[in-house]
């Protein structure tokens, strides 16, 4: 009878499936084991539901054939005891996912037994085999379906041989009605779970995308996102001819700060500079960490004179900052700015601002320098 649901988050590659009979890897701990146990719990819920619905389906055929009490006991054990035994076995395993794959193979083997016991009654046999295949596609793909289908066929043939190959494919109305819960409710449950997993995957992808655009230490946009923002701003400038300025700044004598006070204080300085830049910026401005102790401010609708005023605000705020772990430390920054023009690309824009920053350092640091292109307004 059916057992589990689709779970793309831990779907095993073909090679893992081939190696499952002999799990030689060391036990899992921490997050890996927690992740695998989530898979085990999800399968347990769906197995409990699927086998309970399957019980009604198979029981209707046993009742039709007036089967012996032994088959009824076996069906009850399979439907109501096996789901919990399977979870217990997986929970005790060093590799819960591998143990659960073996449990799924047991499900298919038992499905073959019940198809033979039902004497190949057409509708319940097809429903049972189909639901078991849907389960396996969701977990291990078509390779896993092929393996478990062979196991289902083998146990079906073996059981049928022991019973003398009885065949009664006609499905009366009461058996059809008994199959409806499995045919309707179980696929809906799988679909609901798959939808939940898809939403979770979408959230994770959004989070990964956010992490790919964000500097981990400061929370600002990272270099990649900074260049993307610069490209967007240049494109807007080409369309509208509206002014824009790119400012590059770095922390003066940052290496000496790290050497004297240690890297934790250095990290505190970088986070402080990031906070001050955000506090000194307009909503339309963009702030990013370019790399190391370098930061970028993207200032749309701004001239170089406006960029200089913004730099004065930044420097004034930083001069008033007191650091908890370095009371005598005073942080200053040097800034270089370049205005956008239609002929440049992002690399040229950054190089112009970087050259202005270099001049600010040569001139004594803690100052602003502009690299205005021809015709730019000051």
Image (cartoon, rainbow, N blue to C red):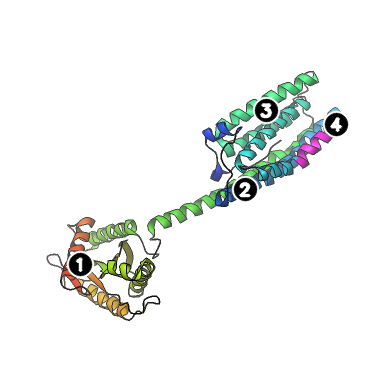
**Residue for point 15% across, 72% down:** 363
As measured in the structure, the alpha-carbon distance from the residue carrying label 4 to the one carrying label 1 is: 87 Å
Q: Which residue is mark 3?
A: 152
Image depth: mark 4 or mark 1 in front: 1
N-terminal-most mark, 4 or 3: 4
Q: Quadrant of residue 285?
A: bottom left
Q: Which residue is mark 1?
A: 357
**Residue for point 79% across, 18% down:** 164
The range drawn in magenta is 73-81
* Residue 293 higher or lower than 28, as above or below: below
N-terminal-most mark, 2 or 4: 2
**Which structural element holds mark 4?**
helix
| Disc 1 to disc 3: CB gap under 8 Å | no
Q: Which residue is mark 2?
A: 37
Q: Quadrant of the N terminus?
A: top right
N-terminal-most mark, 3 or 2: 2
**Residue for point 25% across, 78% down:** 312
Q: Quadrant of residue 110?
A: top right
**Which structural element holds mark 1?**
helix
As measured in the structure, the alpha-carbon distance from the residue carrying label 4 to the one carrying label 3 is: 21 Å
Of all residues, the one furthest to the front in this rendering is: 260
Image depth: mark 2 or mark 4 in front: 2
Asked whether residue 324 appears in the rendered view, the answer is yes
Observer-nearest of 357 and 262 = 262
- In the rendered image, residue 79, in percent from the top left (x then y), is placed at 76, 39
Q: Which labelled disc corresponds to residue 70?
A: 4
């Amino acid at each position: 009878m059916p057992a589990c649901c689709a779970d793309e988050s831990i779907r095993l590659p073909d090679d893992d499936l081939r190696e499952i009979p002999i799990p030689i890897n060391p036990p899992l701990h921490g997050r890996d084991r927690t992740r695998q146990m989530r898979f085990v719990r999800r399968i347990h819920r769906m197995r409990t539901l699927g086998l309970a619905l399957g019980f009604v389906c198979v029981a209707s055929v046993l009742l039709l054939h007036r089967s012996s009490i032994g088959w009824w006991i076996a069906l009850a054990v399979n439907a109501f005891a096996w789901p919990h035994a399977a979870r217990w076995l997986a929970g005790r395993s060093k590799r819960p996912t591998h143990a659960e794959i073996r449990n799924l193979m047991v499900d298919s083997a038992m499905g073959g037994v019940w198809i033979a016991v039902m004497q190949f009654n057409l509708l319940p046999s097809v429903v049972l085999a189909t639901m078991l295949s849907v389960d396996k596609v969701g977990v291990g793909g078509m390779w896993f379906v092929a393996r478990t289908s062979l196991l289902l066929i083998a146990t079906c043939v073996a059981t049928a041989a022991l019973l003398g190959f009885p065949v009664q494919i006609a499905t009366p109305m009461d058996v059809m009605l008994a199959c409806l819960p499995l045919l309707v409710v179980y696929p809906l449950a799988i679909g609901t779970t798959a939808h939940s997993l898809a939403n979770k995957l979408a959230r994770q992808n959004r989070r990964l995308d956010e992490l790919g655009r964000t500097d981990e230490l400061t929370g600002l946009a990272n270099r990649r996102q900074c260049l993307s923002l610069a490209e967007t701003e240049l494109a807007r400038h080409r369309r509208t001819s509206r002014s824009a300025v790119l400012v590059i700044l770095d922390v003066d004598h940052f290496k000496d700060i790290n050497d004297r006070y240690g890297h934790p204080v250095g990290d505190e300085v970088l986070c402080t500079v990031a906070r001050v830049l955000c506090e000194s910026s307009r909503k339309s401005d963009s702030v990013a960490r370019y790399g190391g102790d370098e930061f970028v401010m993207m200032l749309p609708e701004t001239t170089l004179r406006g960029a200089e005023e913004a730099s004065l605000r930044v420097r004034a705020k930083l001069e008033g900052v007191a650091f908890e772990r370095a009371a005598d430390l005073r942080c200053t920054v040097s800034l270089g700015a370049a205005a956008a023009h239609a002929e440049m690309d992002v690399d040229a824009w950054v190089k112009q601002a970087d050259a202005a920053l270099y001049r600010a350092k040569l001139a004594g640091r803690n100052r602003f320098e502009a690299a205005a292109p021809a015709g730019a307004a000051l």
